[in-house]
Image (cartoon, grey):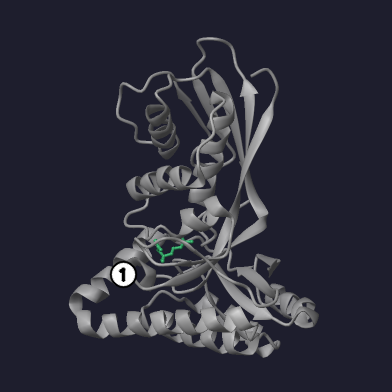
């Protein structure tokens, strides 16, 4: 390898079904193709080892010169899994990761960074692997560093397709009846998905039948949402998102800031709105008529959203 090259992976957003998906219910998520992580591969001197530089202030630089010690860093774990699988030794190279995806905000930043890193390393190694294998490495890394992930983040991010996802089942691409517009508004508050997931686990352990009932209701909403998307009925999708939000509140994973943005979006004419991802902070999503997007976006910003992203799912 003599030239610089680049690999990339997108952000994702969960439309319906977060939290219940951890317990085997279906979930729907879509990639956010315009918001991405880039992994630039830069040649490095012989013997320098693998140097991974990132713009994440928590993980600014990691230099790996040997894999003899067990790794406590997700970058090293991912690199190790890949090199082991391919039977390759540590390359001398620098990988510069630049992520435009806010961390800890429900957009899958962790899985996207690892996906871009693995794809960058594949360029270095002159190897290519199926998305299935890349997905399994990203999932393994997620499991080690993020508690008990369902696998939906890595799946949407690696395949870059809207998916209907059930843990442990083959991935199903979601059919989109006609394109629809989403606004994604960031509360600006970072929140730990791991903590939210473990709090829901505690609720479940205290009263399994009652919480299971909520998960079942979410699963039914996801299936209804899938049908609405397949026929392009976004009025119904909006109502389904609103109902999903009520259950997420009952699961204690919403927050005052999320509730406020959800209400503002609905008052401005969104067809429906809910939190997305782990909750407690991070992002909310609203499905809107395209002609109403500017107004809803402006009201969300006026209400304190730190960013509003717009995307068309097709
Ligand atoms: O906060 P995010 O974007 O990582 O989404 C988490 C989604 C959960 O359903 C809460 C957890 C999971 O692993 O699926």
Q: Quadrant of residue 212?
A: bottom left
Residue 183 position within the rendered picture, expressed as x and y whole percent measured from the top left? 67, 72
Tell me the residue at 43%/21% (across/down).
88
Q: Which of 95 and 186 is in front in this view?
A: 95
Inspect this view and state whether residue 102 appears: no
Asked if residue 93 lies left or right of residue 291, the reply is left
Query: In this picture, is 66 found above or below 130?
Result: above
Q: Quadrant where the N terminus lies? A: top right
Residue 81 position within the rendered picture, expressed as x and y whole percent measured from the top left? 38, 34
Query: In this picture, is 294 found above or below 189?
Result: below
Tell me the residue at 47%/43% (across/down).
134
**Can you tell me whether the CB of the residue at mark 1 lies under 8 Å from the nearest atom of ligand 1?**
no
Q: Which residue lies furthest to the top in this view?
A: 46
Inspect this view and state whether residue 111 appears: yes
Residue 77 position within the rendered picture, expressed as x and y whole percent measured from the top left? 39, 35
Q: In which quarter of the image is residue 30?
A: bottom right
Q: How crowded is mark 1: few (under 14 residues within 10 Å), some or many (20 or more)?
A: some
Q: Nearer the viewer, residue 195 or 243?
A: 243
Residue 198 position within the rendered picture, expressed as x and y whole percent measured from the top left? 30, 64
Residue position marked by numbered label 1 in the rendering: 23
């Amino acid at each position: 390898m003599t030239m610089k090259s680049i690999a990339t992976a997108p952000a994702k957003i969960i439309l319906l079904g977060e939290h219940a998906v951890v317990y085997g219910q279906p979930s729907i998520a879509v990639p956010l193709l315009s918001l991405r992580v880039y992994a630039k591969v830069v040649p490095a001197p012989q013997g320098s080892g693998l140097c991974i530089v990132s713009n994440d202030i928590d993980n600014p630089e990691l230099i790996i010169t040997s894999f003899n010690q067990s790794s406590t860093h997700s970058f090293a774990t991912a690199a190790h899994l890949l090199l082991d699988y391919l039977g390759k030794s540590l390359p001398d190279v620098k990988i510069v990761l630049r992520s435009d995806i806010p961390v800890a905000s429900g957009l899958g930043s962790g899985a996207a960074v690892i996906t871009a890193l693995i794809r960058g390393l594949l360029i270095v190694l002159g190897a290519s692997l199926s998305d299935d294998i890349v997905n399994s490495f990203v999932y393994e890394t997620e499991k080690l560093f993020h508690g008990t992930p369902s696998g939906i983040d890595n799946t949407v991010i690696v395949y870059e397709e809207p998916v209907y996802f059930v843990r442990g089942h083959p991935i199903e691409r979601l059919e989109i009846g006609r394109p629809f517009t989403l606004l994604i508004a960031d509360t600006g508050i970072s929140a730990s998905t791991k903590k939210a997931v473990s709090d829901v686990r505690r609720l479940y352990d205290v009263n399994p039948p009652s919480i299971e009932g909520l998960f079942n209701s979410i699963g039914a909403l996801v299936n209804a949402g899938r049908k609405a998307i397949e026929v392009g009925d976004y009025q119904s999708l909006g109502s389904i998102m609103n109902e999903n939000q009520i259950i997420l509140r009952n699961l204690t994973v919403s927050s005052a800031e999320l509730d406020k943005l959800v209400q503002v979006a609905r008052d401005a004419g969104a067809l429906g709105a809910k939190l997305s991802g782990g909750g407690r902070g991070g992002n909310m999503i609203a499905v809107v008529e395209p002609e109403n997007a500017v107004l809803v976006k402006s009201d969300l910003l006026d209400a304190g959203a730190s960013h509003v992203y717009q995307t068309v799912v097709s």
